[in-house]
Amino acid sequence: MIPAPREDIVDRIYEASVLPGFWPDVLRDFAGIAESREGVMVSVKGDELKWLTSSAVADTLVQENYKHEGGMERTRRLLARSHPGFLTDRDVFTEEEILKTPVYADYLIPNGFGRGTATVIHLPEMQNIIFHAEGDHKQGPYSTETIIRLDGLRPHLARSAMLSARLSFERARTSVETLAGLGFAACAVRQNGSVLVGNAQFERDESFWTTRLSDRIALHDRNGDRQLADSLAMILSDTGVRSIPLRPQGENMPGVLHIVPVRRAAHDLFNQAAAILVLTQASRAPTTHTPLLQALFDLTATEADLAARIGSGQTVEQIALMGAKGVETVRSQLKSVLAKTGCRRQADLARLLGQLVPAGM
């Protein structure tokens, strides 16, 4: 019997972001929400695979999965779909394929597995994080309600995985070591925005913020500064903006400031801290994808494309015409984008994201 997941899983997801030793417990509860036996988090970067699992059984499951023919095909098909939520085996394989593919027929199903659901979190630098739950094929398809519950956890998993990926899934011993290990500008702040500690990149980079007048961080982007204050005020809740787009300053590229709540035992590392602020910046290299928007604002592929087009100056009517959609459909999608990015108007979105992704996507 699968144990019921604890209700405080969102807090513990953020706790695990800086205390990777807590991931097995989180993955066990994640599997429980998915009505599955085991949970796995896999980092995929090129041909390199790293993973954390809910148990020793799950660790063996991952190793055997990739040994058998068809194991990598599950991952390839999942990555190819670029779906903004959780998919199941039956979304990427037919039932006939499942019964004939060696990894299912020879290993998964005989060992009480073969019923999987997973989602991909696209991170910068061509890295992907997969959250995967594995259950018994005999249980049949996943219910719509189960997938909806998992999709609700996805934004929290995405933010936490971003930090864990930068930490290479290794336990950090002190707050300074943790922030230095992130590889980009980051700081720990109190709920009022006062900076407790920052890494070397944060101390050097004043293109997006200043702390000269006080110890409180102030963003040069006024709209972003307002959103940051609002987000920190609501940091103890599960609502509010967690990723803030920042306009370029001078010759710098635009960026995104990510607000990662410090919860539970993570306070052992970040005493008195309410959140970790992490800055990522857009690349100057042209691209035809929008993984940064999708992963960090939890946009669907359609929403990310819409945001990019708005940023490049296209109107709702032009986007509807080019996409053979109704104007009201595009406006409905735009409303969702505005809510997720913390913008109030289309003009705000265009101003803040106009240079975050290349035009013409």
Image (cartoon, helix red, strand yellow):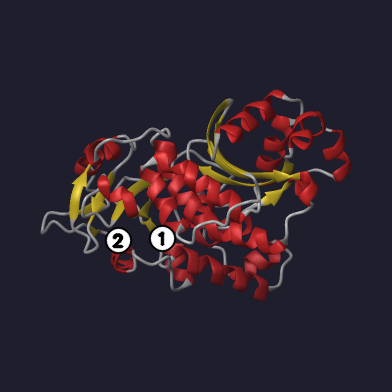
Check the image and name the residue furthest to the top.
67
Q: Residues within 10 Å of mark 1 (few under 14, many from 20)?
A: many
Relative depth, front residue between 332 and 39: 39
Check the image and name the residue furthest to the front.
1
Q: Position of residue 247 (x, y in %)?
A: 36, 56
Quadrant of residue 307 within the rendered picture: bottom right
Type of the residue with mark 1: Leu
Q: Up-down: is 52 above or below 218?
A: above
Q: Is residue 171 left or right of residue 151?
A: left
Relative depth, front residue between 81 and 94: 94
| Dot 1: element | helix
Type of the residue with mark 2: Asp
Q: Residues within 10 Å of mark 2 (few under 14, many from 20)?
A: some
Q: Position of residue 205 (x, y in %)?
A: 24, 44
Q: Residue at x 59, y 25 (%)?
A: 47
Q: Are marks 2 and 1 in contact (CB under 8 Å)?
A: yes
Residue position for label 2: 221
